Amino acid sequence: MIRHYLKIAGRAMARNKLFSFLNMAGLAIGLAAFILITLFVHNEFSWDDHWQRSEDIYRVEGTITFPVREDRPTPNAPGPVKDLLEQSFSGVEAIARHIVYPTTVKVGETLYAQQVIHADNGFMDFWNVPLLAGDSGQALSDPSGVIISERLARTYFTNTVALTDVLGSTISVNIQGQMKMFRITGVAKNPADTTHAPMDMIVRFNRQNFDGARWFSDGWRSNPWKTYIRVAPDVDVAAMEAELPKLLEAAMPPAAADQDPARRRGLVLDLRAVGDIHLYGNDSSADVSSLYGMLAIAFLILLIAVINFLNLSMARVAYRSREVAVRKVVGAGNTQIMQQFLGESVLFAFVSLLLALVMVEVSLPYYNAFLNAVIEIDFLAEPLVLVLILLLGLGVGLSAGSFHALYFAYLKPGEVLYNNSSDNPGGSFFRKVLVVGQFTIAIALMTVAVFVNRQIEYASRVDLGFDDQNLLVVSGVTADVSDTFKQTLLSSPFISAVGRSSDVPTEGSEDRLQILPNAGGEKVTLDGLPIGPDFFSVYNIPLAAGRYLTNAEPDILRSRLEEGEYRGAANILINAAGAKVLGFDTPEAAVGYVGQVNLSTSLAFEGRIVGIVQDFHFDSLRSAIRPGVYYVDQMRIPDMTLRIDSKNRDAAISVLEEAWREFFPSDLLAYREMTQMVEDQYQLDMRLGTMLTGFTILAFVISCLGLYGLAAFMIERRTREIGIRKVLGAAVPDIMGLLLWQFSKPILIAILIAGPFAFLFLQDWLQAFAYRIDLTLLPFIGVCSATLMIGWVTVFGHVLAVSRKPPITAIRYE
């Protein structure tokens, strides 16, 4: 029986080659798009699921809270948290901590930039890091031992044949400015691409390595540790998390009695499942809503493909009605008829699925390069994926074939054989509804894609408030040689200016300072930025009032010559937004104002405003320009920005490299270009915008394939009518206008439906940007016009052919 059904299905495909091709092509493209998008989304949601017992591992994340300024989330936790958790919760089986330390590694005479993990006791057992060479139990027992990944071993020791050959080799690691020797005691398996914590180099934590580091302490005031816990399988993690505030209150030292309550800080701890860190962690840059949006697009494209399949199948109903009627007369039951047509649909779906998998396999290398990811389909490693894909094909086949299978099952053979024809299920109205549905989705997607790309383009062209061209940024310039290094660079004719700061635009500022406003009352919060006097000149940020800061003593809050002591008073700059938040109507009115500035919960100074700079973007356009305060702190300006000669870029870089080797021989130079840094802020948006545009085009292609096939069928059915119209005097333009209008109506209806949905979505999406484009009608009109033109071009060939056919041929057609 199955063989018989397959034979009938094959004959039906061969008899209707055009419709079979259109059905298969549309469904294959839709399935390929669906698979590609879901692979990407699945990859994003499956980070860190490779760890043993990953469902029981949590990271302890902290949020530093302040009474009068915004809280500061961090992926780290203070050192005492480890003992607190061990002593308070019996369900905690193990705790692992490490510090991530970006630095320079020297192998022979070659320098490499590398993140080094300084691991606390129990790290290897906790993560169960597999070693390809060495003993995992003893690899970190020696304080001078280091474990490196296989890829680092191949990079550092290019002539290595066996990984055991690198054991005992030595490398030097720059820790706090000193090169320290380590001996390789283990080679680990390469970390997974989908992990938030790539463990390429692991050393044992040694407290002495960080003596004197400003950012490190053993108390509650510092948060240097990445802290992870593994809990017993039956532990209620939510209940543990609920107890943390009470435990912290009892464990943390109380604030001083005379401390201003507005300057006190607190700490909130959260337990983040390791599988959620990539998307929801305090250090995550992922956009989860965009992932759900892409998943919705995947299902919409699949829906378009299924509608396309259903529509074309329904259009051919009349051609198979007599076949079904005859089969029923000779004894075929309803169940057999349903099985036949459902089987044909499932066969179509699986052939299309096979073509889709070929498309996916061919496109994956380019897809991965575009996404900077490693996405693959491995049925042997993940048999569940194979099962899901087979279920996808089965589900699409059953859903797409169910309508006409039911119609044929309940077809009355007497009416078909007596009238020698069969009405279409639901008539042409239902087919038009499906076409409207297809184009509604396609037009809405294209409208969204156009505005998303317009917003991204706007973000890349907006005036930043500073000149980002020809700027190079170098980090890690130590205070003791900062001036000398700067003068060496400025001695070159290819470098026109050098500015210094604690942070640079696009990378955000971590400092939040409080200043008493002009009218008194509660202090207001401003973003603080330690700078050198040369910062604003190198970025070409103009003054709104007053003057810039200088190297004069009253302008310096902290000098490197005074052993790092803050002065009690210093001149400061603010931006125009800062002048407004302090209560001044104009920038000029703020010049000369003196107020207490809180640097931290325990440190304040008297700040005198001597200048106001124009507002400039320090963050992306998703954030509004925040009030800012700028002050000279010679101990906290490790970032150096160089303005170079655009015509001698290579020469300027050579000067920088030579000077760096002279002053920092143990560090690897890593400079960034400000234009690229600005662009990188929108890389995720640009990538998603390009994906949205690409998959929207595929949705249009599927819709047009369906419209093309439907046009062929409908015009074929109306051939005799057109012949009669021509006999009665209708001209070719009249016939073409009639048919084009018939195919334009569902597109116009789709435009009316798609517009409001698209604009409602875009209105919500654009709220994420503090600076955004206006939702004007002109781009939407352009999308609508393009859709109409595409629809006309799709059906024009059929319309022209039947319009030019001689009337006698058309009348005799049936």
Image (cartoon, grey):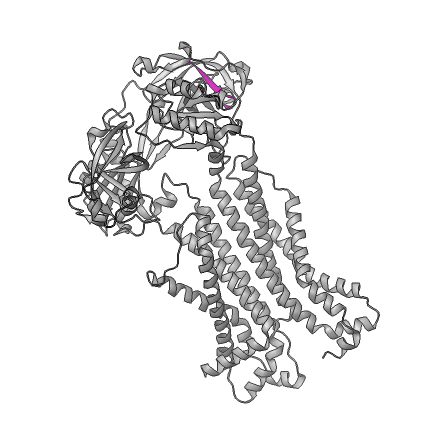
Indicate the position of residue 811 as horizontal and vertical percent values.
77, 77
Indicate the position of residue 175 as horizontal and vertical percent values.
26, 30
Viewer-nearest residue: 172 or 731: 172
Indicate the position of residue 709 as horizontal and vertical percent values.
62, 67
The answer to whether residue 185 is above or below residue 745 is: above
Residue 749 occupies quadrant: bottom right
Region in magenta = 571-578
**Which residue is drawn at the image coordinates 31% and 51% (left, top)?**
49
Give the dominant element type of the magenta stretch: helix, strand or loop: strand
In the image, is residue 576 part of the stretch drawn in magenta? yes
One can see residue 578 in this view: no
**Which residue is drawn at the image coordinates 39% and 59% (left, top)?**
377
Viewer-nearest residue: 15 or 60: 15
Residue 378 occupies quadrant: bottom left
- Residue that extends furthest to the front in the rendered view of this protein: 159
Quadrant of the rendering where the N terminus is positioned: bottom left
